[in-house]
Amino acid sequence: MRIEKLIALTILILIFPFLILIAIIIKIESSGNILFWSKRYGVNKKIFLMPKFRSMKVSAPISSTQTFKNPDLYITKFGKIMRKMSIDELPQLWSIVTGEMSFIGPRPLLSTEKKLLAEREKFKGNAIKPGLTGWAQVNGRDKNSPKEKINYERFYIKNKSFFLDFKIIFKTLIIIFNFRNITH
């Protein structure tokens, strides 16, 4: 969608000074890259590199923080703030501009999440662009089990509509500004 790319680009331009400030804080707090690029599954299972502001220490294992016994050991102080406010996700607007992601859709899976990828295949969940936010994210986010996430994604694909997308955007904004359901 051209309009989606234009909206993402406009947002990036408007928040550019804020992004620079975040980059400076990340660099001051710890050495290493400002952005973290992870291999993710995109539309039709095509691998792409998804950017996030780096919120973890350079020494952290390269894995989903959901697999860590104590993720707080690896997350920087500013990283905790960014994650609580979902600021670390802002670079993904660039992935919308490049056409690899959408604002709304199932979250892009890590390249190591083969079981979830296979489950998505059963309901053509890999046939649409992954999103910055989605139905699973506004209904539990990190608290959802893999099975619950799949059920929410299946529901979204079956019921995809302008109204449902609007509801997801609205609920996303409420969650971000209330810092709800964001654990890591």
Image: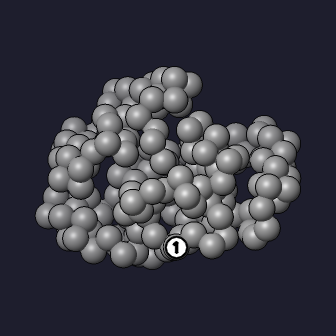
Q: Residue 14, percent across and down?
A: 78, 38
Residue at 35% x, 52% y is: 106
Q: Nearer the viewer, residue 41 or 141?
A: 141
Residue that badge 1 annotates = 61
Residue at 40% x, 75% y is: 111
Residue at 77% x, 61% y is: 30
Residue at 55% x, 65% y is: 50
Q: Residue 69, percent across and down?
A: 39, 60
Q: What type is the residue that disc 1 sits on? A: Pro
**So how many labels did they put on this image?**
1
Q: Residue 108, percent across and down?
A: 41, 60
Q: Nearer the viewer, residue 169 or 137?
A: 137
Q: Residue 53, percent across and down?
A: 66, 56
- Quadrant location of residue 18? top right
Mark 1: give few (<14), some (14-19) or many (20+) Cα within 10 Å. few
Could you tell me if residue 150 is visible in this image?
no
Could you tell me if residue 53 is visible in this image?
yes
